Amino acid sequence: MTLLVTGGAGFIGSNFVHHWLAEHDEPLVNLDKLTYAGNLGNLQALAQDKRHVFVQGDIGDTALVSQLLQHYQPRAVLHFAAESHVDRSIHGPLDFIQTNVVGTGHLLESVRAYWGALAADPQHRFRFLHVSTDEVYGSLSPDAVAFTETHPYEPNSPYAASKASSDHLVRAWHHTYGLPVLTTNCSNNYGPFHFPEKLIPLVIHHALAGKPLPVYGDGMQVRDWLYVQDHCRAIERVLQAGTPGETYNIGGWNEKPNIEVVRTVCHLLDELQPRGDGQSYAEQITFVKDRAGHDRRYAIDARKINDTLGWRPVETFETGLRKTVQWYLNHADWVSSVTSGAYRQWVDLQYGG
Ligand code: NAD
Ligand code: TYD
């Protein structure tokens, strides 16, 4: 038995690959295009592990994907690959439509052809698990109840709209063709291998480099943070016991305003690697121009996955964030390898140098 994972060299995908191979002997084929966000360094510890087969390629390359499906005969496809950064989607939305919408459409067609030709038993057991986001639901007012699986879709950013489109495609392939799909909509993740364009790793990286810590607008936008390992465990559980055609919201019951997240990171750094001048890293916090169309609040109601599949997060924000900050302090070489040329161009474009 084998799994086909897409986007397994990115943040969540690589954490999932490590998690899976630590817990199971079932091999994984990892298809990743290696965009700026994909990094083989995330998988370095598996270089000698024969259970992990890495293939560089695009989910939209139907010839390649069909060949991989035929050759490895996976029992499931776990679809992580995407363009994932909201700010980049504001600067260049078409890449998001290409990968997240068109790419997912091609992938679904390759998988449908493979699945349709399987014998009855493997066909019955096959799963296509689509990894999506809470951002498809749009923004909540401060006192609104958290997103359930039946919350209307109201995506606001090009990223969110492209993910919402992909969710709809996945849903339609189930409804029309009977493809046994599972969709997960998760809140903001944090943890090891998180690319330092996203808030938490960017703040750690900039703090240690003595740079300003850019907080958009008033810093009171709320996100619901989940440690990435808990997300991986949820995906594993949905794959194991989820009902085809169902969607599962995944979240940490952990809403925090951005400014509080940034201050907590600063305090952890003050403790674990104090600044030479005795000042707090919080001195570096700088309020900058807000993101266009910035969603005010996300919050996930994770009762369905809790009640039906028995999943709950293991980490609290305090334990997960401490592990994360410590991981970045221990992996300065990883950070410097991913913050080279192309990364600097992005920081200049987004933060004006
Ligand atoms: P990421 O940007 O870190 O990684 C994406 C990976 O996909 C990279 O390795 C990249 O090389 C690969 N990729 C991109 N385009 C590809 C293509 N056309 N073909 C093959 N590979 C391609 O993203 P992430 O944060 O790990 O997110 C993974 C998935 O989880 C995404 O679908 C994202 O929408 C979803 N998600 C992310 C979060 C979060 O907080 N990061 C939360 C909920 C859901
Ligand atoms: P991000 O990590 O980009 O995730 P998402 O947009 O998918 O939620 O951003 C998390 C929050 O942090 C979001 O409200 C935007 C904010 N943010 C900043 O305030 N400053 C920054 O430099 C970045 C990258 C994000």
Image (spheres, rainbow, N blue to C red):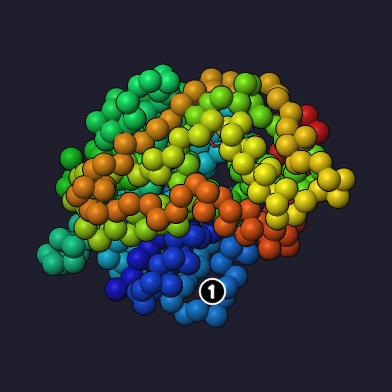
| Image spot of residue 283 (x, y percent) | 77, 34
Number of numbered callouts drawn: 1
Splitting the image into 4 quarters, where does residue 303 fall? Answer: top left
In this figure, which residue is indicated by the disc labeled 1?
Answer: 46
Q: Residue furthest left?
A: 120
252 on left or right of 223: left
The residue depicted at 70 percent of the width and 25 percent of the height is 287
Which amino acid, mark 1?
Answer: Leu
Secondary structure beneath disc 1?
helix
| Image spot of residue 105 (x, y percent) | 36, 43
90 on left or right of 27: right
Residue 117 appears in the figure: no
The residue depicted at 40 percent of the width and 23 percent of the height is 140
Splitting the image into 4 quarters, where does residue 95 fall? Answer: top right
Q: Residue furthest right?
A: 277
| Image spot of residue 296 (x, y percent) | 49, 23
Determine crowd level at label 1: few under 14, some 14-19, many 20+ residues with C-alpha closer than 10 A: some
Splitting the image into 4 quarters, where does residue 142 fall? Answer: top left
| Image spot of residue 320 (x, y percent) | 52, 53
Which quadrant is the N terminus positioned in? bottom left
Choose between 243 and 262: the one closer to the eye: 262
The residue depicted at 48 percent of the width and 67 percent of the height is 18
Image height check: is 25 above or below 311? below
Choose between 230 and 315: the one closer to the eye: 315
The residue depicted at 42 percent of the width and 72 percent of the height is 21
Which quadrant is the C terminus positioned in? top right
Choose between 269 and 93: the one closer to the eye: 269
Image height check: is 287 above or below 179? above
* Label 1 C-beta lies within 8 Å of the nearest ligand 1 atom: no
Choose between 231 and 10: the one closer to the eye: 231
Residue 201 appears in the figure: yes
